[in-house]
Image (cartoon, rainbow, N blue to C red):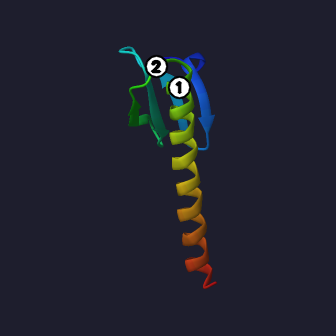
Amino acid sequence: MTESDILYENGNYWVCASKKGGYEVYRNTITHSVRCAIIGYKGNEGLARAKAECNRRSAHDSKVESSSERTKTGH
């Protein structure tokens, strides 16, 4: 897999087409990426769902990170 296989990216998450059809969502880590979701739908509907999942996970991480920062600073 190469960077050109990435169809969509948001934060630490990215989407690529699955070899079996549909799409996969991956999360970047320090040394590699880990698949965290498989979207079985194909075509435009599948890509839209994969993008939505990517966005949902990225927003969740941002929310958790923001909450963690408030806890550290006491606010």
Q: Nearer the viewer, residue 26 or 51?
A: 51
| Residue 17 position within the rendered picture, expressed as x and y whole percent measured from the top left | 48, 19
Whether residues under marks 2 and 1 lie with C-beta atoms below 8 angstroms apart, the answer is: yes
Q: Which amino acid does label 1 sit on?
A: Glu
Give residue 40's position: percent from left, percent from top.
38, 26
Pick whichever, 63 or 43, lies toward us.
Answer: 43
Q: Which residue lies furthest to the front in this view?
A: 45
| Among the 4 quarters of the image, the one containing residue 39 | top left
Mark 2 neighbour class, 10 Å CA radius: few under 14, some 14 to 19, many 20 or more: some
Percent across and percent down for residue 13 are 54, 39
Label number found at residue 8: none
Between residues 14 and 43, which one lies in front from this camera angle? 43
- Separation of marks 2 and 1 at Cα, in angstroms: 6 Å
Callout 2 secondary element: loop
Q: How crowded is mark 1: few (under 14 residues within 10 Å), some or many (20 or more)?
A: few
Residue 25, percent across and down?
A: 46, 34
Q: Mark 2 points at which residue?
A: 42
Q: Which amino acid does label 2 sit on?
A: Lys
Residue at 61% from the left image edge and 29% from the top image edge: 8
Give the vertical position of 39 relative to 29 (above or below).
above
From this view, report whether residue 11 is shown above or below residue 38: below
Q: Mark 1 points at which residue?
A: 45
What residue is drawn where x is 46% and y is 19%?
Answer: 42
Front in this rendered view, residue 66 or 21: 21
Residue located 52% across and 29% down the image: 15
Instruction: Tell me the quarter of the image containing the C terminus.
Output: bottom right
